[in-house]
Image (cartoon, grey):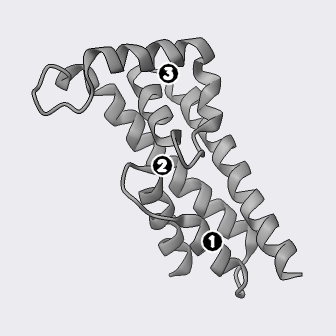
Amino acid sequence: MSYLTLFVTALVSATLLPASSEVLLGALATQEHALFWLWFWATAGNTLGSVINGVLGRQVDRFQQRRWFPLSQAQLARARARFNRYGQWSLLLGWLPIGGDALTLIGGVMRVPWLNFVVLVAIGKGLRYAMVLWLVLSVQG
């Protein structure tokens, strides 16, 4: 059950909804859980949450003319220009607490091929969770 909770928390925290999977991962790492599976399920859930952002990003063109749409044409154009400057490699930074969710959303808007999207996002998120585990274990001693 702990792995499922971690997966769901990691998934939710990768979307625009607030959650903190790092805290849960750290707490579970101090208990009798297999570290590989903690890392795996956190990475998988967080990557899937970013894929959801990418899917939403691919729908932007359908909704950008609606009154309720949260971004102006100018904001969307700036985001596209910034993404084009750094390209799909910027998805490696999808793990960042500020701006990471937006990167994955814009990756969808820019229609990054799904294989590239998933691989780049998973690498970044996997490295972040590995670092969290390393920090927890080094502090725990």
Residue 58 drawn at (x, y percent): 34, 26
For marks 2 and 1 on the same chain, the one whose residue lies earlier in the sequence: 1
The kind of residue tagged 2 is Leu
Question: Label 1: which residue?
Answer: 25
Q: CA distance from mark 3 to mark 2?
A: 15 Å
Determine contact: label 1, label 3, CB under 8 Å.
Answer: no
* Residue at the spot 59% in from the left edge and 63% down from the top edge: 41
* Residue at the spot 41% in from the left edge and 58% down from the top edge: 12
In the rendered view, would you say 7 is above or below 17?
below
Question: Label 2: which residue?
Answer: 48
Task: Check the picture and name the quadrant holding the C terminus.
Answer: bottom right
Q: Secondary structure at mark 1?
A: helix
Q: CA distance from mark 1 to mark 3?
A: 29 Å
Which of pointers 2 and 1 indicates the residue nearer the eye?
Answer: 1
Q: Quadrant of residue 40?
A: bottom right
For marks 1 and 3 on the same chain, the one whose residue lies earlier in the sequence: 1
Question: Label 3: which residue?
Answer: 112
